[in-house]
Image (tube, rainbow, N blue to C red):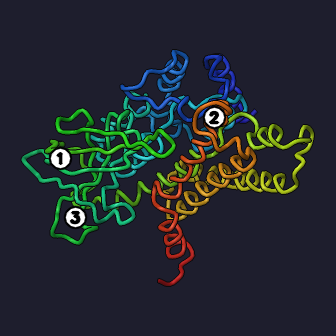
Amino acid sequence: MDTLEQFREETRRWLLANAPKSMFTPVASVDDLCWGGRKSQYDPDVKRWLDIMGERGWTAPAWPKQYGGGGLSKAEAKVLSQEMAKLKLRAPLVGFGLTMIGPLLLQEASEELKRLHIPRIVRGEVRWCQGYSEPGSGSDLASLQTRAVLDGDDFIVTGQKIWTSYADKADWMFLLVRTDPNAKKQDGITFILMDMTSPGVSVKPILLISGSSPFCETFLDNVRVPRSQVVGQINGGWAMAKALLGHERTMIADIFKERTPGNPLLKLARRYIPGSEEKIADAVVRDRITQVDMDQACLDLTLKRSQDNMKAGHKPGPETSIFKYYGTETNMRRRELMVSIAGPQALGWEGPGYDDAELALTRDWLRSRGNSIEGGTSEIQLNIIAKRVLGLPD
């Protein structure tokens, strides 16, 4: 038996022996996953699974051991992922720490920042949010106006961030601030890390048309942030921002895939289309379901290949705009198809005549309409693809 196969057998035995039984069951939504941090309470089994995997470093299996990661090779990390998938085990931890700020810190941060933040990310002790967009500075991110003025060993930060996902649940924020208002707009930006408990930080949730939202406004009123929390160079934050956006777009493409057990499109068709017990009676619906499933399968395989490359040390590039665009467009088409299959039963908001699943279907469809905006609009992604992937002229 070669070394990798031995590792596979040992890994499978370890997972079977240590994972709580409830972690072998699928999650109903992303809200059932463990995001870590100090502000959320989790089921004891969820917390135990996080602690077990975090202690082993397997929440971030390919990250270096000196920062708390698993220290696995690319091949070993792939084996772990495969075995967890075979056993249908839940991820012990998800969130922006693992998918966005952690990879950037490993690539660009000082040794001091790596040792301060990365072990806490691996153990799920800190939940992160992102402070990029501002009122009037969304697609044109480089026009941001949140100011950071140096005062001794601290920056004094004043301004406002918007669409900061889960800011009300986060412990730390990574954000862009303007440190040189006289420089070219891309050249006067700094990438900095901020404790959300700092005096002067306040957060207000933003409700969407769906009735709920992960989004928030974050107000910064003379917030002191230590200069030591700068990632990269002062006024060099734009390069950090672009590097992190690659990780974000890959994460967004992955997070919106359907996680409901089975095939919810088929289940809906069998419920609402008469005569569909064995085979979906409507040929057009059959074709549309098949197309969505094929598109998602192609995206999943492409994302897996890209994630394997990143585990091997490759930095994400402009191709991540393809992932973001394709992933969010596929999710929106899926939600539209679900509403179409349910017909009038997908038109309810409250009151009699609709069950909880039908009301949730309506809200999920409305929520999906924001997919083409968050993380960079679809129009911006198409421009990046045209210029930086296909090399088309302006």
Q: CA distance from mark 3 to mark 2?
A: 42 Å
> Is residue 271 toward the left or the right of residue 367 in the image?
right
Q: Earlier in the sequence, mark 2 or mark 1?
A: 2
Badge 3 vs badge 2, beta-carbon distance below 8 Å: no
Picture coordinates of residue 72, whole percent (x, y): 55, 37
Q: Earlier in the sequence, mark 3 or mark 1?
A: 3
Q: CA distance from mark 2 to mark 1?
A: 39 Å
Q: Earlier in the sequence, mark 3 or mark 2?
A: 2
> Could you tell me which residue is drawn at 77 percent across and 56 percent down?
291
Q: Quadrant of residue 84?
A: top right
Picture coordinates of residue 322, whole percent (x, y): 57, 63
In the rendered image, is residue 345 in sight? yes
| Marker disc for residue 188 | 3
Mark 1, secondary structure of its residue = helix
* Circle 2: residue type: Leu
| Marker disc for residue 80 | 2
* Circle 3: residue type: Gly
Picture coordinates of residue 9, whole percent (x, y): 71, 27
Question: Mark 3, mark 1: which one is toward the viewer?
Answer: 3
> Could you tell me which residue is drawn at 32 percent across and 42 percent down?
173
> Is residue 378 toward the left or the right of residue 131 in the image?
right
Q: Looking at the image, which residue sits at the far bottom?
A: 393
Q: Quadrant of residue 17?
A: top right
Q: Which residue is mark 1?
A: 227
Mark 2, secondary structure of its residue = helix
Q: CA distance from mark 3 to mark 1?
A: 16 Å
